[in-house]
Image (cartoon, helix red, strand yellow):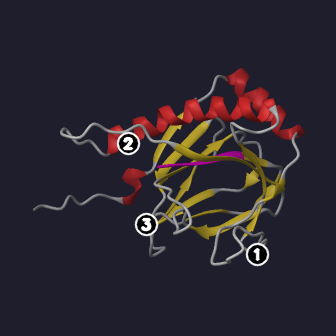
Amino acid sequence: MEIKNTKLQDYIKIFDLVLNEDILNNFLEICKARNFENAKIIGSSEEGPFVNKKIRKTDVWALMNQARSLTTVHWFNLLNFCFTQKYYQYVVENFKNPIIEQPIPKIIDIQVLRYKEDFFYKYHIDQCPQTNRQWSSIFFVNDNYEGGDLVISTADGGVQHKIEKKKNRLVIWPSNFMYPHTVLPVTKGIRYSVVSWAQ
């Protein structure tokens, strides 16, 4: 059996102009007016997710389709619809199998993140025993800030891929140990993004 030699960056895909410009601007205004909470991490704690600002210093607004706020439900449904289409396109283009019909990926979590100045998220991977994440994505809501770069690395840290920040851009990659990634500290302005995970 021949093993195809592929580069890790082959499985990092970028989709631009994901939302209508007016919808994107409306969403950004909603984000600016929204109350956020301290973001948590999943680790070895038996108590469940916990805040650790030495690893992840960012704010989060969790989107759900069963929230009390109709605004939250609306944005969950809209982003879930748009992102699911891109996840499906990603899977079909990267994992073609002429025998097996590709299932439509199911998004299991969507979060809006706010990175103020000096906020960051150290290198991590998104898949762990507590989660069943297969694909990860980040959507750039705005790009009028400095720092806050998304960097995806090889597992050994030997090669780093800095993703150009551009509003209305969605980046998708595998959630597994081969794709550790970080958000570098924001040095000026506020970075708004949406993260999601699918299986």
Drawn side of residue 47 relative to residue 108, left or right: right
Q: Label 1's element?
A: loop
In the rendered image of this protein, does residue 108 appear above or below residue 178?
A: above
Q: Residue at 70%, 39% (x, y): give it.
A: 141
- Amino acid type shown at disc 2: Val
Task: Name the spot of residue 72 as percent of width and height, x first.
Answer: 77, 35
Drawn side of residue 110 relative to residue 136, left or right: right
- Amino acid type shown at disc 1: Lys
- Quickly name the residue at label 1: 54
- Quickly name the residue at label 2: 91
Q: Which residues are magenta?
A: 193-199
Cα–Cα span, label 1 and label 2: 34 Å
- The foreground one among 2 and 100 is 100
- Amino acid type shown at disc 3: Met
Drawn side of residue 7 relative to residue 184, left or right: left
In the rendered image of this protein, does residue 108 appear above or below residue 162?
A: above
* Of callouts 3 and 2, the N-terminal one: 2
Task: Name the spot of residue 84 as percent of width and height, x first.
Answer: 51, 35
In the rendered image of this protein, does residue 73 appear above or below residue 36?
A: above
Name the magenta segment's main secondary structure. Answer: strand
Q: Residue at 54%, 66% (x, y): give it.
A: 125
Magenta highlight on residue 194: yes
Magenta highlight on residue 195: yes
Residues packed near mark 3 inside 10 Å, few (<14), some (14 to 19) or many (20 plus):
some
Task: Name the spot of residue 171 as percent of width and height, x first.
Answer: 53, 45
- Quickly name the residue at label 3: 178
Q: Label 2's element?
A: helix
